[in-house]
Image (tube, rainbow, N blue to C red):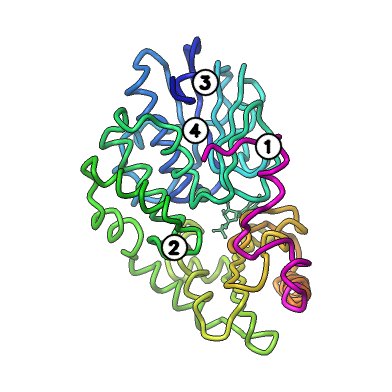
Amino acid sequence: MMQIEEWVEGAATAVILGHTHPDGDCVGSCLGLRSYLRAVKPELRVQVYLEPFAEEFHFLAGADTVSADFHEKKRFDICFALDCSDRERLGDAAGYLDAAERTVCLDHHITNEGFADVNVICSQASSTSEVLAELMEPARIDRATAECLYLGIVHDTSVFKHSNTSEKTMRIAGALLSKGVSSSHIIDDTFYRKTFGQNRILGCALLAAELRLEGRLIASCVTGEDLARCGVTNRDLDGIIDQLRVTEGVEVAVFLYEAGPGMFKVSLRSNDLADVSRIARSFGGGGHVKAAGCTVSGTREEILERVTALAAEQLRQEPSERGGRPDGAGNEREKNGRNTCYK
Ligand code: 5GP
Ligand code: MN
């Protein structure tokens, strides 16, 4: 029996949760698991809870059944927490995790220390969608499930571009394509297409960008006022950090947006030399070696000063002092035996 089928054995109800501000991998993995469970165990009652997510993902099967009501008095036999590196990332949905009979966390973040009864954390995997695809029986993955997982992989690899794209990622994506997924639809319509407002805020962020550390760090920030001027919300900011990161000479990219009074969401990316998960972790956030984030209170200037100082320290160090290989290979978490990664 496959692992997922074993976990839901004897369960009548299941809940699937993802992180706050759900991205493509989060939505894709949650809806992909929902579709798979419906195919392999139709009698299981499955509910997905997520914060409202981007319009582009609404075509995925089951998107219309997702609830954002995090305060229902419901207890589920099994809870799956997907793409979340810690319990806090679940936001207001954490109550469903706490109340569930059994909990399973499936993730690929290097900073995840395992907060569920069962933890499958593969920091080498491109995405939680890839982790899930490996736990599913290939013959029982239908087109609906494949679309969700393919979308998740496309988004977390920025269309098979980031260094987290392995040979295995491509093999899994190929197998998903064989289920009838329209690759060009998913890539063009959910990743590259931008609304006019999204392009305007991208332009605004690029104009506001500044170089620090002799051009090795790029930073930009957009305020609530900028969002209003461009007619967008904080759900329209995907891709900005990636454009900053590809600036010539840059090792670390930092993007801030105002998340509330005196509070900023910070996105961090690195090219080859820095481990930005360490920077994020020192602010209570987390993520991957090359892509991480956190939410920090303070002024834009204060936060940028602190992040710049930590990045400068990272860039001065030898790779061994930075916390392992920049690609995260051989990290200690997968060796300590507490969490499992199914290869
Ligand atoms: P992004 O910059 O795209 O929001 O996030 C980059 C990566 O860092 C993602 O894998 C995301 O899950 C993780 N991340 C972003 N913000 C936070 C945070 O506040 N806490 C934790 N633990 N991880 C975060
Ligand atoms: Mn992910």
- Image position, residue 114 (x, y; %): 68, 37
Q: Which residue is mark 3?
A: 7
Q: Which residue is mark 1?
A: 114
The quarter of the rendered structure image containing the N terminus is top left
Q: Which residue is mark 2?
A: 232
Name the amino acid type tagged 1: Gly
- Residue closer to the observer: 249 or 135: 135
Residue at the (72%, 70%) spot, across then down: 319
The answer to if 326 sits in the magenta stretch is: yes
- Image position, residue 220 (x, y; %): 59, 76
Numbered circle sitting on residue 49: 4
Q: Secondary structure at mark 3?
A: helix
Q: CA distance from mark 1 to mark 4?
A: 20 Å
Which badge, 1 or 2, is on the more N-terminal residue? 1
**Magenta stretch, overall SS:** loop
Residue at the (47%, 64%) spot, across then down: 162
Q: CA distance from mark 2 to mark 4?
A: 24 Å
Q: Secondary structure at mark 2?
A: loop
Residue bounds of the magenta highlight: 314-343
Q: CA distance from mark 2 to mark 3?
A: 41 Å
Of badges 2 and 4, nearer the viewer stands 4
Q: CA distance from mark 3 to mark 4?
A: 19 Å
Q: Secondary structure at mark 1?
A: loop
Q: Secondary structure at mark 4?
A: strand
Circle 1 Cα neighbour tier, 10 Å, few/some/many (<14 / 14–19 / ≥20): many
The answer to if 11 sits in the magenta stretch is: no
Name the amino acid type tagged 4: Tyr
Which badge, 2 or 3, is on the more N-terminal residue? 3
